[in-house]
Amino acid sequence: MDKIEFKQTFIERLAELYAMEVSDATPIELYQTLGSIVSTTYTKQWSKSWQDYRDTKQKQVYYFSIEFLPGKMLKSNLLNMGWLEIVEEALSELGIKLDDLIEIEPDMALGNGGLGRLASCFMDSIASQSLPGNGNGIRYRYGLFKQRFVDGHQVELPDEWLPKGNIWEVRKDSKAVDVHFGGSVHLEEHHGRLKPVYHGGYTVRAVPYDTGMVGYKNGTVNTMRLWDVAIPAEEEEHYRSIEDRRMVEELTSVLYPDDSNEAGRKLRLSQEYFFVSAGVQSILRYYKNLHLPLEQISRYIAIHINDTHPAMCIAEFMRLLVDQENLKWEKAWRLTLQVMSYTNHTIMAEALEKWSIEMMQDVCPRIYQIIEEIDRRFVEEMSTFHNQGLIQRTRIIQDGQIHMAHLAILGSHSTNGVAKIHSDLLKNVILNDFYVLYPSRFNNKTNGIAQRRWSQLANPAMTKVLNQTIGDSWHRTPTDLHLLMNFTEDDEVLEQLAAAKLENKKRLAAYIKEHKGIEVSPEAIFDVQIKRLHAYKRQLMNLMHILKLYFELKNDPKRDIHPRVFIFGAKAAPSYHYAKAIIKAINETANLINHDPDIQDKIKVVFLENYNVSLAEKIIPAAEVSEQISLATKEASGTSNMKLMLNGALTIATLDGANIEIREAVGEENIVTFGLTEKEVYRYYQEQNYRSLEWYHNDPVIQRILNAFIDGTIPNIVNEGKQIFDSLIQYHDEFFVLRDFADYCRAQEIINQLYQDSRRWNQISLINIANAGIFSADNTVERYAEDIWQIRPNPSSQLGGAAQHD
Ligand code: CJB
């Protein structure tokens, strides 16, 4: 479509939809019009993609995830369709600013953080690589809460995103399936086989809403299928009371706002079974329509379990094969192993899901029976194994609880971690017992990011410089960013990149001014920590360093530091009081420092509210320092580290997660690392000889800083300050903040020094961009496709499955 054609279509569509002319239409009407043109256009390719998959019987993967975090989709759809520039220009000729329309779209925030965002990055890359792959999840009516600060405290407001209209989804009543909950099940003999007989319980209808996942300029449009709940018409009489109806509606009402620790609640388990059962049933229905033998299903279908939340896929698949399709258990089990694969995203014990037997029996009794049988057979099969202690430790059911990670590992052919160090820890420490039993199941797949969103969409200024310098092959082949390494000594390119960064910083400064009323200088270093608020991510250590600088400047206002703006973005789980205390402490410190005339604007602290995908797109292009400071071993991978690197920020990092691979990629001189290593952390655990109190007593700087939390230096944090202080002293500083603090300050001083040499800084920035290509999710999903899912690019995609340059 060219510009003239587009303008014509736009004017016509606006008239069709609203009987209006451009000059009369509101931004919402204009947005809806544009969205309608975009979606009706890709719909043709959407049907072609799934028809191709069906007609040529291509193997497809289904990515089951309880969270998807796509953010806004208008601009990324335009980019992937190859329309972005034309549309922007055409609209501008009609007197419309594309950016104003983009603002209208609500962020689709059906995820908490890294895990959900990764799922969406994968959806983009799977489509962009012409891979036959679909998402399967829940259509929550309320996404992740909106965060507001009131007197520095986090307050959570509901995220009502649907009433504003979601132009991308298509409801498909004809594809609905029923999901049965509760009641009881007993087994009866039927033609020589045991068959389940259900008593009581209730049935709900799962209705899919499909969203097209548009691939990058390749004609592929895949499906993200999110399930909503409805009461089946024929079951109406069972749902007479308001209570009963509410119970059903609740199923897809809210996303649990905790990204790592769900306190075993029944509703959560019901949500898990709901989207698992709906998804697996619809896959099987599709497969049966292909009229292929059931025994061959693993040649055509792969199911991926994203963290343990969808681990019941294994038992549900067994249920359908055995109860419904009458397959023998052994055969069904073999197929299940071949079809299923699992990703682990964390080693934090509290995030490893466990459910009580009673609760699972209550929610899905047949699934419980099947898990019990899987467990029984595992123990039986392993009865001659020399180490029976190991078998007891790896069982699914232990001490009245069902261990979902055990189910996921024992019931699948692949378990992967999300960065080298994380996968090694799984093999050697956390899941070592399983590794001993099934070494070939374990593998690593380092995370990746949707490269184009985090560069072309978020950072047009940098993109322009890159395109002029190295051409645009990196759009499709992100490792071509490496061509930039030819320009490390090219002053013009270095300066152009620096100018792009400055432009982005000015934009962010304006945003900060508008939203926080804080004046920040674009000449200052923009230092960024954006991620969920967690003790292990150590936002507290960042705050302590800020306080250190503050006290130094108070003592000596002439102290020579380059002005720095410390920018935070982070939501805390509503029930995570410690994390909320840290938010309050950061906000109060910001108030204190930002208004202190002695500081002369040398440091500013900005905590931006409601960190989400859209805000990340504003912050990341302007960032110069990327704070990746988790305690070594605790951050499985991290993905903001990759996004910030791609945008030319220098990483200050512990040797944790993917930071280690970033260091390998850029070289030691282009990253600043500090802190305990994995080995040192484990030595402390073994020898149990970390005494945080000693670090407090022996270090006057630490003393001064920690006292500030309890002596009124930081105002209005009587309770929060005490909680923080106690966590470090009385509760022994679980994440070694005091132990790593001095080394962190040393690393920060290196950054301060490096920044004085702007040429060197610009080189580091360029080298980071140049080496970010390997962290593209395009690359990551290709590895999944080849090693785990065994799926191939659609041969009849416009690219013929092969990577081509634009
Ligand atoms: N992660 O966001 C979550 N939620 C969890 O419950 C467990 C882990 C994060 O997943 C990301 C994607 O793999 C990782 O990069 C990150 O380190 C991890 O904390």
Image (tube, grey):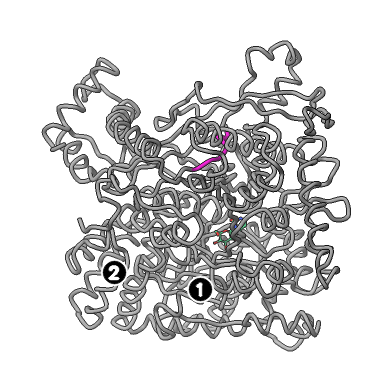
Q: Secondary structure at mark 1?
A: helix
Q: Residue 330: x percent and y percent? A: 70, 48
Q: Please tell me whether residue 503 is drawn above or below residue 548 in the rendered image.
A: above
Left or right, residue 309 beside residue 646: right
Rounded to the nearest angstrom, the CA distance separating label 1 from label 2 is 19 Å
| Label 2, residues with CA under 10 Å away: few <14, some 14-19, many ≥20 | many
Of all residues, the one furthest to the right in this rendering is 399
Q: Secondary structure at mark 2?
A: helix
Q: Please tell me whether residue 758 is drawn above or below residue 580 in the rendered image.
A: below
* Residue corresponding to mark 1: 659
Question: Residue 721 sits in which quadrant?
Answer: bottom right
* Residue corresponding to mark 2: 481
Q: Amino acid at mark 1?
A: Asn
Q: Residue 141: x percent and y percent? A: 57, 32
- Residue, x 73% and y 66% (percent of image)? 724
Q: Nearer the viewer, residue 412 or 698?
A: 412
